[in-house]
Amino acid sequence: MDFELNEEQREIWRWAKEFADKEIMPRVEENDKKAEFDWDLYKKIAAQGFFGAVLPEKYGGQGVDFIAYALMTEEIARACSSTRTLFSVQISLVELPILKFGTEDQKMKYLPKLATGEIIGCFGLTEPNAGSDAANQQTTAKQDGDYFILNGQKTWISNGSIANLAIVIAQADKSLGHKGICAFLVETDTPGFSARPIAPKLGLKSSDTSELFLDNVRVHKDQMLGKFGEGFKVAMYCLDQGRFSVAAGAVGVMQGCIDISKKYAMERQAFGQKIGEFQMIQQMVADMVADCEAGRFLVLRAAYLKSKGVRNTRETSLAKLFCAEGAHRAAHSAVQIFGGYGFSEEYPAARYFRDGRVLSLYEGTSQIHRLIIAQDELGIRPANGPGSPATTFDRLSGLYPEQPAPSMV
């Protein structure tokens, strides 16, 4: 096994860290207090080429692998989870699905603009009654000649009211169940499309989170992403990508909590010594470090498989579950180490605590990921498809033949 990053990966990690320290960190507290999207920071991120990270050069991207993408995501989240949300939605929930399922015309039309930040994307799956139950889509797509008429509502959509392009999941034929669901590329200036920000929120205050409303939105059939009936497959692919970026972001939250806790523990004094010299504080720091290191390796393992093109639903679920829960624990410990100051919005521990709470909710709750992992382990429903061995070690050891990627439906 090779645990060493190559030079390109190390350089991208340094690049992302320097950008986060220089451009994101100085803004994060003010943006959080204002609860406003930072357009100037958005332009700086776009100018760096971050949004095109994983896209091929053909579509205006840099073609980095998923290990480098994970490290970039971690560094951005270490500085600001709201900014990480913007970054990973653009890439994981919009660019990658278009890259996989889009026609060449769709790719050439949208990917270069997404890569440069000329346009912003969002992913419209969640509805008031369709969160974890993603197949229960109430948004409808009624065919009318060469067009589909979309009607419905989406909620908790990151980037929703600032997006120029939305991937919208809708039911086109209810009699077919989830096989009647379709995905559409909807430009947000289309008549009948509107968005309304959701506020106030517990955390991610400078990230745009909105409801989407579709009132007889007329979309040409050429704007369908994937084939008729592949919408659920598109949605599940999107969730796999989104879960990966949330897991990487959760590692950043853990690292951020470690950083602020170390600094405070070696400055704050009580009973005549630095509080970092007390064993109970050391225990909390040690647990945070162990969770962060373990979580990072889970994310990088999933990234390795993604870069190889190997199905990784199980590994991504493991990473998302562990890292989201680890971020909770780290933020809780950070508040505890800061003591009374941890309960104050004047110190960063409170922001990490608030922002970290959502990590176990979106892109699949922790309960959903436990279900995926347990059913895979028990052989009830293999996460990586029929015939796939349960453990990653088995899959990588060479003892089992590589399985072709099966249908995700």
Image (tube, helix red, strand yellow):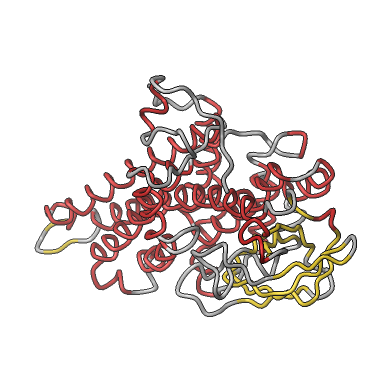
Which quarter of the picture shows residue 327?
A: bottom left
Report the front residue among 278 and 133.
133
Quadrant in which residue 213 is drawn: bottom right
Q: Position of residue 177 (x, y in %)?
A: 62, 61
- Tally of marks: 0
Residue found at x 29% / y 63%: 332
Give the percent coordinates (x, y) of residue 3: 39, 26
Residue at the spot x=9%, y=63% of the render? 271
Seen from this angle, which residue lies furthest top? 398
Q: Quadrant of residue 150?
A: bottom right
Q: Position of residue 158 (x, y in %)?
A: 60, 64
Give whichever of 267, 164 is nearer the camera. 164
In the visual, does 132 lie left or right of 136? left
Farthest residue toward the right? 145
* Vertical side of 205 occupied by 166: above or below: above
**Quadrant housing the N terminus:** top left
Outermost residue toward the front in this view: 175
Outermost residue to the left: 271
Residue 293 position within the rendered picture, expressed as x and y whole percent measured from the top left: 33, 41
Horizontal arrangement in the rendering, residue 201 relative to residue 376 (left or right): right
Residue drawn 74% across the image and 75% down it: 194
Relative vertical location of residue 312 with respect to residue 324 in this rendering, above or below:
above
In this rendered view, identify the residue nearer to me: 90 or 219.
219
